[in-house]
Image (cartoon, helix red, strand yellow):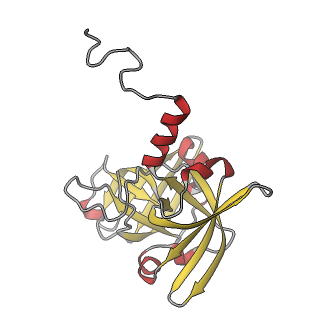
Amino acid sequence: MFTGIVEETGIVRSVEKSEDGCVLSVEGVSFGQELVPGESVSVNGACMTVTEAWESGFRVDVSLETLSVTRMGSFVRAERVNLERAMRLNDRLGGHLVLGHVDSLGVLVAREREGETEFLQVTVPYGHRAFVIPKGSIAVDGISLTVNRIKDDKVGGECRIELAIIPHTLDVTNLGDRKVGDAVHLEYDIVGKYILRARETGSGSMDEPGKGGGHGLR
């Protein structure tokens, strides 16, 4: 589990594709020597398992499933990626609870600067519009951000969210590299997803499946 507070950016060294997915190598990592095989690292918001690590980088295997829901297969050499190690239980939760499971891709459709702040507009798949609320949290490429406004265009079948990006976030993440038309990874707030799921299934009690608690004893 992660917080959406990016520790630093790394540099894509290579993307080796195969029939089973691809192997991604990331360089320019200050905490490379601290990583061990099996450890989790968020790469642009996708939770990946370290298979090899060295002083300045690490390597991960990217499955076909992950490639199907992310843009990791289109990473290019020297591209900057956002990195965050898994949170410790005694850490401050500076952002929000982020699983590192990308829900969908969004598209950056506009960016405007007002003073020191940049306002980004990102599309959200219309079928996922229930997962975003004004002043709620969303992870964009692994960055914990607050939804300022929502533009729900029923005619065009498009939902856009507006995000305000402060200079610090632009400095320590790769958001400054994103151009209009670029795809980004989206992960919606897990609390909202569970609430919506409970409403859809009509579940109101943890005892529902067996009509009894514990081991089913009466």
Q: Is residue 35 above or below residue 215?
A: below
Q: x%, y% of residue 119?
A: 57, 77
Q: Is residue 42 left or right of residue 179?
A: left
Q: x%, y% of residue 117?
A: 51, 84
Q: Examine the image and state in which quarter residue 92 appears.
A: bottom left
Q: Examine the image and state in which quarter residue 85 appears.
A: bottom left
Furthest toward the bottom, the residue is 115
The front one of 63 and 99 is: 99
Q: Is residue 86 left or right of residue 158?
A: left
Q: x%, y% of residue 66?
A: 53, 46
Q: x%, y% of residue 47?
A: 42, 51
Furthest toward the right, the residue is 155
Residue at horizontal 45 percent and vertical 41 percent from the top = 194
The front one of 48 and 178 is: 178
Furthest toward the top, the residue is 218
Q: Is residue 198 above or below residue 122?
A: above
